[in-house]
Image (spheres, helix red, strand yellow):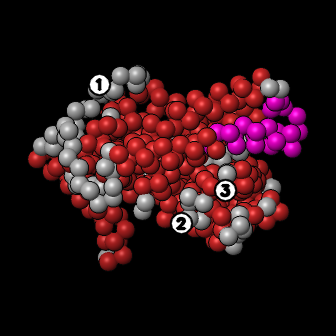
Amino acid sequence: MSRLHPFTLLAIAGSLPALAWILPAPAGGAWAAAVALVLTLTPGARPGFTSVFRTAVLTAAPFWLFLLLLHDVPTTVAIGLRITTMVASFVWLVATLEPARLVEAMVAAGWSASIAYLLAATLSAVPVLKARARRIVEAQRCRGLSPRGGIAARLRALRALALPLVLSALHEVDERALALETRGLVPGIRRTPLAPPPDPALEQATRWALLLGCLAALVWRFVLPRLT
Amino acid sequence: MSIRLLALIPVAAAISLALSAAVDAVALPLFLDTTGTILATALAGPGVGIATGVVTSAVNTLRNPTFWPFVVVQIIVALYAWVAARAGLFRSFRTAVPAGLGLGVIASVTSTPISYLVFGCTTTGGIALTTALGKALGLPPLGACFFGSFVSDFGDKAVTFALVTSVLHALPRRTAARFPWALRAIGAA
């Protein structure tokens, strides 16, 4: 599955939740959820993403609990199946879609290199900043900062933890801008991808079929009943 | 858009997502997931703020798919922060905190229909429990859902505005002057 073109993976992961919401409940949601859960069982997950099915089920389970707390059983089943479809589709997508391949595919398709940069740079910056946040927490604790006490004390502690993190991140902006300029990433410039993922005609046709399928379901569900 | 503003967007989005580590350390019921959006808007205007909000939602969706429908809230937050920055409301806590409380109301009004229609008010455990409390208090389903969103958003946005105000005032003037809106947001220009 991970060898599929990134746009095909996105189209599958996007159309399943859309169909779950459009088609009548609970049958529509049940079908979509079943397909999404079967996808999580297919091989081809990226290294480090094991037991995709279990992750999807564990992520969706709390929603069912909260839905039961707030709604009757038919509503719980209807909304729960839709949420399960959404969760399973995206968990599968994250497990199979390589961010670097997505960036290559976007550049190959003529998207601005800036948009591809925004996605890739954020994905790489989050773990770096999270690790820095943990180091700041440990350093401030060594200096005697207590994250306990009343709300006012905790808010003061939060400021002492968040401020160094945000300021240090902002100071990096100039360095990043310089690096981007050096690499010629100026808006409006078309770049050539090094290894664009193959995009066979069959996959392109599948993406169109999924899009048209969603549109047809929308018309069948919401437009036709008003006309008849 | 200049290269510096382009470089600001992923940094601001990553700030929103990384602050959860600081929030976890102090065990407060806060999200702070709009900090980067508000900060980017206050520094560089609505275009950069909206782009930061959309990127934040897109990357957050890869971690938890329930975030994507709330991308609208990020856009509303960016527009509100722009108005606040134009009015210089980040000049002190005295002006920033009420502005943040106002945003809390607007954010909960915006997120309630999404939470109600898409998730049946179960976006997070906290919201589901406060919604259940609202139902127990006799509120209608949509009212209970608003109550749940309001309880989680009201304080969160006030703290976020206060934090952004702290950051803007702690930035050296020379650094702040490199961003088009920073000095105006704190009432220094």
For the N terminus of chain B, give its image quadrant.
bottom left
Which of label 1 and label 2 is nearer to you? 2
Which of label 1 and label 3 is nearer to you? 3
Q: Magenta segment, principal secondary structure?
A: helix
Badge 3 amino acid: Arg
The reply, left or right, for residue A219 in relation to residue B21 is: left
Q: In the image, which residues are magenta?
A: A145-166
Q: Which chain carries label 3?
A: B
Residue A86 visible, this orientation: no
Which of label 2 and label 3 is nearer to you? 3
**Image position, residue A130 (x, y; %):** 58, 33
Magenta region includes residue A156: yes
Q: Which of B53 and B29 is in front in this view?
A: B53
Badge 2 amino acid: Pro
Q: Which residue position holds label 1?
A: A43
Q: Residue placed at 82% from the left, 42% from the top?
A: A156
Q: How far apart are marks 2 and 3 (CA)?
A: 21 Å
Q: Which residue position holds label 2?
A: B46
**Numbered label attached to residue B173:** 3
Mark 1 element type: loop
Are the residues flagged by discs 2 and 3 in contact, CB closer than 8 Å?
no
Q: Which chain carries label 1?
A: A
Q: Do labels 1 and 3 share a chain?
A: no
